[in-house]
Image (tube, rainbow, N blue to C red):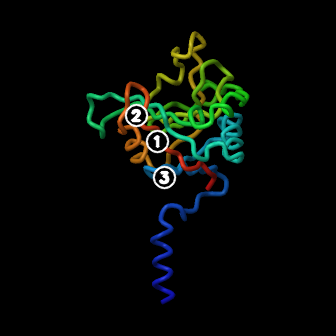
Amino acid sequence: MKNILLICFVLFCGNSCKQYPANESHILIETVSGDIVLQLYPDKAPKTVAAFLKYIAAGHYKESNFYRVLKNENVPAEYNTGLIQGGIFHSNPSLHQQLKGTEHESPRQTGLSHTNGTISMARSTPGSATAEFFICIGDQQQFDSSRRTGSDGLGYAAFGKVVEGMDVVSKIQNKKSNGENFVDRLRIINIRKL
């Protein structure tokens, strides 16, 4: 009987019981479409990682959502590139307006590039990033020094990478959308440290 209970526990536990090195920061994004595990890089992007962890500790991401998507509608799902963006912009707009921006850590400073699975902070101007983030699907090095944010050319603050769950990221990207917005925002149950 003990063996059966142990086997059931191991099967039930699955990925959530994996052990990660104590010297690394691993984060779990729990969504209604599945789990995404991130490894953060506090040694390369300390201010951005500290801000993200502060929002996690404060519970800001509970019942938040992925609401924005970039994809090519004419490409099969398994070959698509782009991004998914999430945070509290829609789920808690009053809190979103209260948050102070984080000092910008450019890819030029950190050496981090927007390759497949990279998580990065969304922003308008340098220092305006708060709780909104995006995950790259496919290599998106144009965000390393993008001029889409104006004339600064400083890119977006990459601060970690997906280590498990890129299939979930792709599944989310392929949800029905209208332009850059999901028709139905995808619920983030919570984001927490592992």
| Dot in front, 1 or 3 | 1
Q: In the shown orientation, is residue 136 left or right of residue 58?
A: left
Q: Quadrant of the C terminus?
A: bottom right
On the image, the x and y values in percent for residue 50 come to: 71, 40
Q: In this view, does 139 lie above or below 64?
A: above
**Residue toward you, 40 or 169:** 169
Image mark for residue 183: 2
Residue drawn at the location 59% of the way across and 58% of the way down = 20
Label whose residue precedes the other's in the sequence (2 or 3): 3
Distance between the alpha carbons at the discs numbered 1 and 2:
9 Å
Q: Identify the amino acid type marked 1.
A: Leu
Of residues 94 and 45, the one drawn nearer to the viewer in this rendering: 94
Separation of marks 1 and 3 at Cα, in angstroms: 13 Å
Q: Name the residue under label 1.
A: 186
User: At label 3, which amino acid type do we have?
Assistant: Asp
User: Which of the 4 quarters of the picture holds residue 82?
Assistant: top left
Sequence-first disc among 1 and 3: 3
Residue carrying label 3: 35
The three-letter code of the residue at mark 2 reads Val
Other-residue count near label 3 (Cα within 10 Å), few / some / many at <14 / 14–19 / ≥20: many
Dot 3 falls on a residue whose secondary structure is strand
Q: x, y percentage for residue 6?
A: 50, 80
